[in-house]
Amino acid sequence: MSEAATLAWHQYRLERRMFWRNPAAAFFNFFLPLLFLFLFGAIFSGDQSNLDVLVPGIAGLSIMATTFSALTMNITFLREEGVLKRIRGTPLPTGSYLSGVFASAVTNAFLQIAIVVVSGKLFFGIGWPKDWLALVVFTLAGVVCLASLGVAYSHVIPNFDSAAAYQNIVFLPVIFISSVFFDVDHVPAFLRHIAEALPLVHIIDGLRGAMVTGAGVADNLTALAVIALWTAFGIFFAIRGFRWESRRA
Amino acid sequence: MADAPAILVRDLRKSYGENEAVRGVDFEVARGEVFGLLGPNGAGKTTTVEILEGYRARSSGIVSVLGLDPGERSRQLREQVGIVLQSSGLYRHLTVKEVIAHWAQLYPHPRDVDEVIALAGLDEKRDARIRTLSGGQARRVDFALALIGDPELVFLDEPTTGFDPAARRQAWDVIRQLAELGKTILLTTHYLDEAQALADRVAIIKDGRILAEGAPGELGAGSSHYRVAWRDEHGEPQERQVDDPTALLHQLTSAALARGARLEDLSVTRPTLEDVYLELTSEAPADV
């Protein structure tokens, strides 16, 4: 392993250790999407077509919660606390640091997807995913896209006190219009257009194909293209706008 | 470049919009020296140090740290420099030892983790979570992290601000140990006694300019005048500043002899660092 990769690995292990070191945070991180899954699952129980929407929808929500939301909050906190500034004063390369942080978010996303997939099989009549490759591809695409958008978005947030508000104003509307809880066809046209301009609905489309309908990667290339566009946007601003210190003055 | 000074600063300037925070600062720090930048809040100390640390870009001037330009933020330089920021947080849920051990992995030739923990006086807190530490203890972790990479040069930006006297003394002990290890140290402080206790040389900075520079003991002595104090025949304390005290002393002693009285509380002193500091920074707003 090259030195930069070794350092990224050290950072990753540290991030994992910190994640589990704070069990309450870890618990709620995994619990919230599951709570939604079981609440709405109970409401829709017996209606398989709704459950077929819900389970991949919750999978998409999980990706957004573990990457976009978690990174937005985390980076804002570390910036305000001065941890980022301290790290900047060490020889740790920026790329190694961000890779470690990023990989940790990816791990959480995959863990969560695994939990949702198993729940779908055991409790919601979805069965095992029809297309594992598509599942991996869309999970990975979703994770990279939403993680980079989370880091980019954190640059806009002025301080940690306002981070939750900034985070929710994006997270909540997006999950409601992105057919997490109901089929996107039931949404008014103008909201559907907004949702379709955003990445989450496409991530969920891909996941639904993989988990429910059996549509593979080739069937969802448009979705993948939209996700890729947002990813390029996210990565550009995540790196370009990265701030190591909070604004004081 | 081994003979190059640890730090060289020539006509350093830094503006934030209209506001010129640093207005032509010059100084040099030799290897192994403890150099103190002393000045009131807002004097430009932190701006200067953060330029040397590579956190800020300078507007103009020449800056060299260990022979390298900190503005380029080279990894080579960061490997040789330890930084204690004015305030900076840490991973709250990790233990002292975990954090220090992690930091050791970032450097090519780190010092021994246990040795650094002992040096920073953290033996009893090695397994404590960071979030449970007091301000003084957290500061010692800062020292440990600045030291773990075995740096040539250590920056300490107001290392004891807000500390109680006991915590300050402990922090001073750690800094003295750093100096004994042969580290070059650049210290900023607005505490006079801190500069006096720790620094080999001091520069007094105010409004972005260096007003005086020298060893703490000589800064006052270099001044041209003496201070003569005594009690007059009514027992009132008197004090006068003169360039040459010879004539005044002759006058005082002969007057006392003529009265047949003792000359009470006579003293002839050079101004101390404190006098110089207060004189130079007198228009400054009071320290918080």
Image (cartoon, coloured by chain):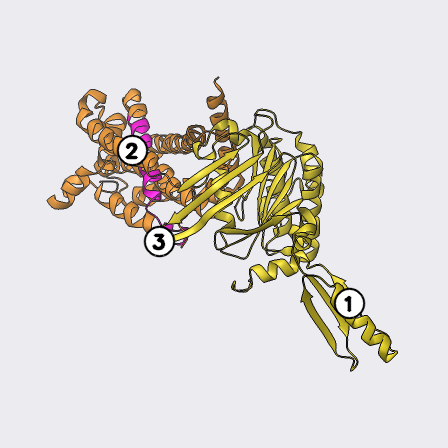
Chain colours: A orange, B yellow
Looking at the rendered structure, the secondary structure element under dot 3 is loop
Subunit that carries the residue with mark 3: B
* Amino acid type shown at disc 1: Leu
Along the line of sight, which residue is nearer the eye, B228 or B174?
B228
Subunit that carries the residue with mark 1: B
Q: Are marks 3 and 2 in contact (CB under 8 Å)?
A: no
Q: Is residue A188 visible?
A: no
Q: Is residue A247 magenta?
A: no
Looking at the rendered structure, the secondary structure element under dot 2 is helix
Distance Cα–Cα, label 3 vs label 2:
31 Å
Q: Is residue A123 visible?
A: yes
Query: In screen coordinates, is B63 left or right of B59?
Result: right
Mark 2 surroundings within 10 Å by alpha-carbon count, few (fewer than 14), some (14 through 19), many (20 or more): some
Is B273 above or below relative to B239? Answer: above
Which numbered mark, 3 or 2, is in the foreground of this view? 3
Residue B249's disc number: 1
Along the line of sight, which residue is nearer the eye, B190 or B91?
B190
Along the polypeptide, which appears first: circle 3 or circle 1?
Answer: 3
Distance Cα–Cα, label 1 vs label 2:
76 Å
Query: In screen coordinates, is B235 left or right of A175?
Result: right
Write down the region rendered in magenta: A138-164
Which numbered mark, 3 or 1, is in the foreground of this view? 1
